Image (cartoon, rainbow, N blue to C red):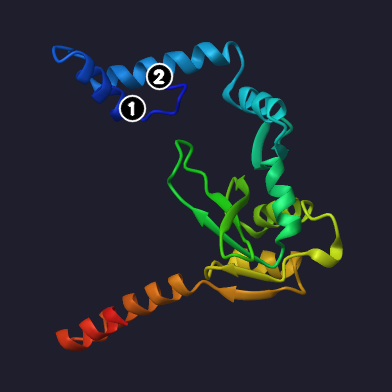
Amino acid sequence: MTKSMVKPKNILLTLKDHNASSCTTIKQIYNARSAYRSSIRGADTEMQHLMKLFERDQYIHWHRLKNEVVVCDLFWCHPDAVKLCNACHLVFFIDSTYKTNRYRLPLLDFVGVTPTMMTFSAGFAYLEGERVNNIVWALERFRGLFLRNDRLPVVIVTDRDLALMNAVKTMFPKCTKLLCRFHIDKNVKVKCKSLINQKNAWDYVMDN
C-alpha cells in the first residue's frame, strides 16, 4: 500500500477492516514504511537515491553545492512541464510554501496557466533560504526551461515577498509583475480587523 501512495491512516483503516482484532498502531505503520523505504534505498543516502530517481524518470533537474559536498539548492521539473511551459508561456504564479517537509526548507513552486484557465506545475525548487541569491539561482533554472527568448513569461504573479519580487525583476525584466489578489485580500482583512470595531462593518469587509 505504501508503494501505491496510500496514506498511513488509510493503511491502518484497511488493516482494521480486514482484521477487526488487529492491534496494529499508527506508529507501527510509520516504522514499517520507513523500513520499506530504507530497504529500497539500500546503502545510498536520501539525496543519492533522489538523484537516481530523477535520472531514472528523466526529470529535468539542477542542483548546486555548498562546501563542495552539501546540496544547498535543488530545482526539478517533469519533462512534460517543459513542453507546457513553452506552449503556454503567458502567465505564471511563483510562491513559496513553508514547514511542509521534514527539513523545514522553503519550497518554491512555479505554476503555469493554460489558455483554457487550467493550471500546471511548471517546476519546484528546494532552497537553502529565501535570500535573493537562492531565488535568482532558481529563477535562472526556470528561465532555462524556455527554448526561445521571445517566448519568456509575459506575466508573473507573486506575493509581496521582496526577495522574490527583486529576483523576478532581475531575471525577467520585461515581464509584467503582479501581486496575488488572494494575498492582498488576506492582508487587507488583517489590517482592517485592528481598525474596525463595529461588527456590522467588519462583517461587510469579510463578505466583500
Q: Amino acid at mark 2?
A: Arg
Left or right: residue 21 versus residue 108 is left
Q: CA distance from mark 1 to mark 2?
A: 8 Å
Q: Which residue: 68% across, 24% down?
A: 52
**147 to the left or right of 118:** right
| Image coords of residue 207 (percent x, y) | 27, 80
Q: Residue at x 44, y 76 (%)?
A: 184
Q: Does the residue at mark 1 contact the one at mark 2 (Cβ under 8 Å)? A: yes
According to the image, label 1 marks what residue?
A: 8
Q: Quadrant of residue 163?
A: bottom right
Where 81 sits versus 2, above or below?
A: below
Q: Position of residue 130 (x, y in %)?
A: 58, 55
Q: Position of residue 182 (x, y in %)?
A: 44, 71
Reading the image, the residue beneath label 2 is: 33
In the displayed structure, 170 sits above or below 8; it is: below
* 19 on left or right of 28: left
Q: Quadrant of the C terminus?
A: bottom left
Q: Secondary structure at mark 1?
A: helix
Residue at x-position 27% and y-position 78%: 206
Task: Name the residue: 77% across, 64% down.
Answer: 152
Which residue type does callout 1 highlight? Pro
- Residue 178 is labelled as none
In the structure shown, which secondary structural element does the residue marked by tag 2 occupy? helix
* 13 sits left or right of 83 in the view: left
Q: Is residue 98 visible?
A: yes
In what quadrant of the picture does the N terminus appear?
top left
In percent of width and height, residue 72 lies at 64, 40
Sequence-first tag of 1 and 2:
1
